[in-house]
Amino acid sequence: MPPSLFGAVDAYIEAQGGGQGAFPTPIDSFYIVRSFKERMRMQQIYKPSICIVLQGAKEIVVGEDTLRYGAMECLAVGMALPATGHIVEASPDAPYTGLMLALDVAMIRDVLEQLEAPPAPPADSGPCLFVRQVDEPLAECALRLLRMCDTPKAIPILFPSVMREICYWLLSGPNGGELCKLVEPESNAARIAKALHLMHEDIARTLRVEDLAEAAGMSLSSFHQHFKAMTSMTPLQFQKQLRLLEARRLMVIEDANVADAAYQVGYESVSQFSREYSRTFGGAPKRDAITQQRLYNEFVGRRMQSA
């Protein structure tokens, strides 16, 4: 790892008061994470993003697949998916340190269109995510993002060019085809992404599987097959996960009560919501929300300090 990158990360964390947690930056889609200990598994919606690990290690579980990524490796996620992630290697002497950056799928598509030799998407319909080494070009992009945070007025001008460069290195790297299959308009991944967008757009709306298949431009059997290959779930299981995770977010971050959270995500029966929530998260909604709020306030709820 370039010493200047780790030094810049460490300096930024100390300028924000030091310690551990999720450290926001002046770039809305970019933040730093440091942890002195391993963290419990956390189910959440992973949105298109890249996570660069500088020290320590993390794991993400999608369906039956587990991906582990450690120092100077990164996880790239191309589409919004329910998954379980946790920090698996961290200590006070060698804390987990990572960078999180949201990816712009429209920019990935735009960069792809300008490549003279675009990567070929793989034939399988698996989820659009992969682990790869962080090479010097990606590390240099991360360092420029950190330096940019010292001059917030420069961010609107310089950030888009660095993001385009990151998209270029991801697409031209050994796993570029994984992102390609998402942005190719007629690929199975892009078709499934249209159905996923519908599900995310109005989470409380009851959608028939036939409507989702029609939005994807697929037959019902083909839609079921490719949807499960990409998400490791059936459409109904996926929608239930989305609703329960959003309800948890509403209770933890927006302090909604159990009934309000249930109704906002489309449940008509609070008792049914409570049963399904308990089966998924291993505890009653109110009790689980209190636990998650404590963890959120301890690790995630940090506010950025101005200079």
Image (cartoon, rainbow, N blue to C red):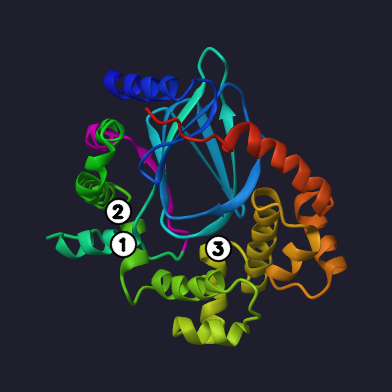
In the picture, measured across the screen, residue 92 lies left or right of residue 284, that is: left
Cα–Cα gap, marks 2 and 1: 6 Å
Q: Residue 35, located in which quarter of the rendered image?
A: top right
The magenta segment is 126-142
Please provide percent x and percent y for residue 242.
63, 63
Give whichever of discs 1 and 3 has the lower sequence position: 1
- The image's mark for residue 76 is none
User: Is residue 226 found inside the magenta-colored segment of the image?
Assistant: no
Cα–Cα gap, marks 1 and 3: 17 Å
Q: In the figure, 198 relative to 98: above or below?
A: below
Q: Residue at x 55, y 25 (%)?
A: 20
Q: Nearer the viewer, residue 1 or 117?
A: 1
Residue matched to label 2: 176
Q: Answer yes or no: do the residues labelled 2 and 1 have beta carbons within 8 Å?
A: yes
Mark 2 residue crowding within 10 angstroms, few (<14) / some (14–19) / many (20+) = many
Query: In the picture, which quadrant includes the N terminus?
Result: top left
Residue matched to label 3: 231
- The image's mark for residue 180 is 1
